[in-house]
Amino acid sequence: MKSKLKIGITCYPTVGGSGAIATELGKKLAEIGHEIHFISSSLPFRLNKMHPNIFYHQVEVNQYSVFQYPPYDIALASKMAEVINRENLDLLHVHYAIPHAVCAILAKQMSEKDIKIVTTLHGTDITVLGHDPSLTDAIRFGIEKSDAVTAVSCSLTAQTYDVIKPEKSIEVVYNFIDERIYRQTNSYYLREEYGIKDEEKVVIHVSNFRGVKRVQDVVKAFAKIAKKIPAKLLLVGDGPEISVVCKLVTELGINEQVLFLGKQDNLEELYSISDLMLLLSEKESFGLVALEAMACGVPCIGTNIGGIPEVITHEKNGYLCELGDIETIAEKGISLLSDKALHQKFSAEAINSAYKNFRSELIVNQYENIYYNLLKKV
Ligand code: U5P
């Protein structure tokens, strides 16, 4: 019988890959008997079900007028130290090197307990913040002073060594899907509700609509696809690029074919009515939305960038194209959407590879082993 651990988890609770994975991991660990304490500024967005092993500790960031900036990091470290002591935690698993690993290190010192710190790198802390010389030392400190560090892809690990140069081994632990949720569901009725005709194919893109996601490339590639094949584009999510994307859709005269759905939950229902996902980012440490889509049987076309090639296998369950190569992306999309047998083959392969390489049990086990190794427990 494995010993039960008391684990504190800190993540950004908002929509996004890191928050989704941190929360799903906490839920899975709770299901196998561990006691999970989420310590974050608001309830993580996927923590939507009660579980007796899950506790939530809210970090209050007060706006005292003496502070020019609200002290999130200090408030978080204080809350972590309080929870470490009161709940007798074995370890803290934090998502992002800064600020969360640095906060955990401070909390450990404040609590004076020999708690272990596991840090998972998700991307933005390295790919964006890592290039800011004023933050590099803090990121390296957070990594080196953690007891174990994981990254969500080989590509992110290589980039971390390249940019941050930490003296620390980093283990790759891929993101995962909860296969009970991400599977083909019967949501065909949605097609009718969205006004999608029987003969139309559905292309989907899901993101935070930041510049790096290159949503304009998605729209341009879709416009070319829609010239050859009757199709609709579902744009899911919201963010800074939304207005330029809207403008482009109008310029290209494809208003009728593009549906802006905004932020949505239960994405498995939308994936299940989709025939193709486009993920054409210029930076991507993993590409969780591609994995989610694949688990629901949707082949993806992605850019040959960052962690995307670790998720999509070229010409097996999707295609990898060069950044901005709209012509090839559209060509691959058209050939896949117009060849039923090829589409079925790719779709089956997508499900296979999602379940084989990224199923929750496999990945949760990897994290559990890291915890037990650090704590010298079984
Ligand atoms: N997401 C949503 N709703 C949205 C947009 C994104 O739940 O409207 C989720 C995706 O399902 C995915 C994460 O789990 O946010 C984004 O992952 P990434 O693009 O940060 O890797």
Image (tube, rainbow, N blue to C red):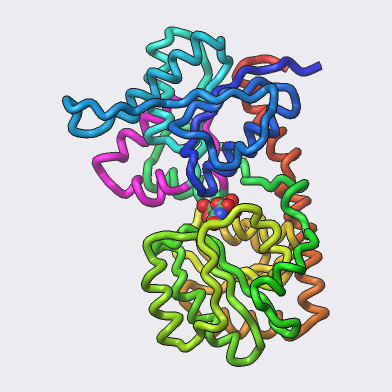
Magenta span dominant secondary structure:
helix
**Would residue 10 appear left or right of 46 to someone viewing this image?**
left
Residue under the point 55% across and 25% down: 56
**The C terminus lies in quadrant:** top right
Q: Nearer the viewer, residue 166 or 318?
A: 318
**The N terminus lies in quadrant:** top right
**Would residue 345 appear left or right of 231 to someone viewing this image?**
right
Q: Is residue 286 visible?
A: no
Residue 124 is covered by the magenta coloring = yes
Q: Quadrant of residue 133?
A: top left
Residue under the point 50% across and 30% down: 10
Q: Quadrant of residue 142?
A: top left
Residue 148 coordinates in the image, percent (x, y): 53, 28
Q: Is residue 81 visible?
A: yes
In this picture, which residue range is highlighted in magenta? 123-152
Relative to 133, residue 223 above or below: below
Residue 362 is covered by the magenta coloring = no
Residue 109 coordinates in the image, percent (x, y): 39, 13
Q: Nearer the viewer, residue 242 or 256?
A: 256
Residue lying at the far bottom of the rendered structure: 228
Relative to 293, residue 250 above or below: below
Relative to 135, residue 236 above or below: below
**Total marks drawn?**
0
**Would residue 62 appear left or right of 79 to someone viewing this image?**
left
Relative to 214, residue 183 above or below: above
Residue under the point 30% across and 35% down: 137
Residue under the point 49% across and 9% down: 85
Residue 144 coordinates in the image, percent (x, y): 42, 29
